[in-house]
Image: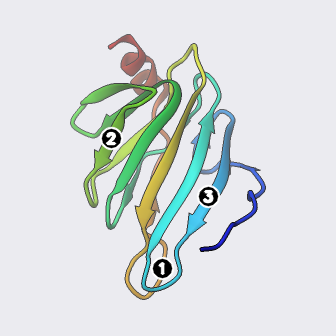
Amino acid sequence: MELKPTNPTAKGPAQNFAGDVYVTPVYSGQEPSRMTVALVRFTPGAHTNWHRHAVGQTLHVTEGVGLVGTRDGTVLRIRAGDTVICPPDEDHWHGAASDTFMSHFAMLESLPGGGDPTTWLEPVRQEEYEAANQQ
């Protein structure tokens, strides 16, 4: 057993997020584990760019109300206690609803042999985000 100290929180990079997003790394697995876990906190209206994960991603909401959108126009309104499974290579975005904070654990696996499993894409258009908030 090993106790790890809390990792420092960093602001999410502006090239991947709209609004203020804060990321606290929780776990980064060492082989044979490929698991990565982070606590991600979104301020009201903040969200990711479109992106996808080679091995998929699991989001577990810990606080607030958020949104997850896919290219086909599907939008899920997520709340504390909800878990969302994003399958491998599905373009999606996620973040807080416009009027509340939202925090989630983001869990994903790295690729075998290393390498970044996340492909970051273009920003979500403001009209897309606003329409998602109305659903």
Q: Which residue is mark 1?
A: 115
Front-most of residues 2 and 52: 2
* Residue in the picture at 32% in, 41% down: 84
Q: Does residue 48 appear anywhere in the picture?
A: no
Q: Amino acid at mark 2?
A: Val
* Residue in the picture at 38% in, 11% down: 134
Up-down: is 125 above or below 13?
A: above
Q: Quadrant of residue 33?
A: bottom left
Q: Which residue is mark 2?
A: 84
The numbered mark, 2 or 3, whose residue comes first in the sequence reads 3
Q: Position of residue 49 (x, y in %)?
A: 49, 44
Q: Which residue is mark 3?
A: 26
Asked if the residue under mark 1 is in contact with the one under mark 2, i.e. CB atoms within 8 Å, the reply is no
| Horizontal arrangement in the rendering, residue 60 relative to residue 55 (left or right) | right
The numbered mark, 1 or 3, whose residue comes first in the sequence reads 3
Q: Position of residue 37 (x, y in %)?
A: 52, 58
Residue positioned most to the left: 72
Badge 3 element: strand
Front-most of residues 98 and 107: 107
Front-most of residues 88 and 91: 88
Q: Amino acid at mark 3?
A: Val
Q: Does residue 108 appear anywhere in the picture?
A: yes
Badge 2 element: strand
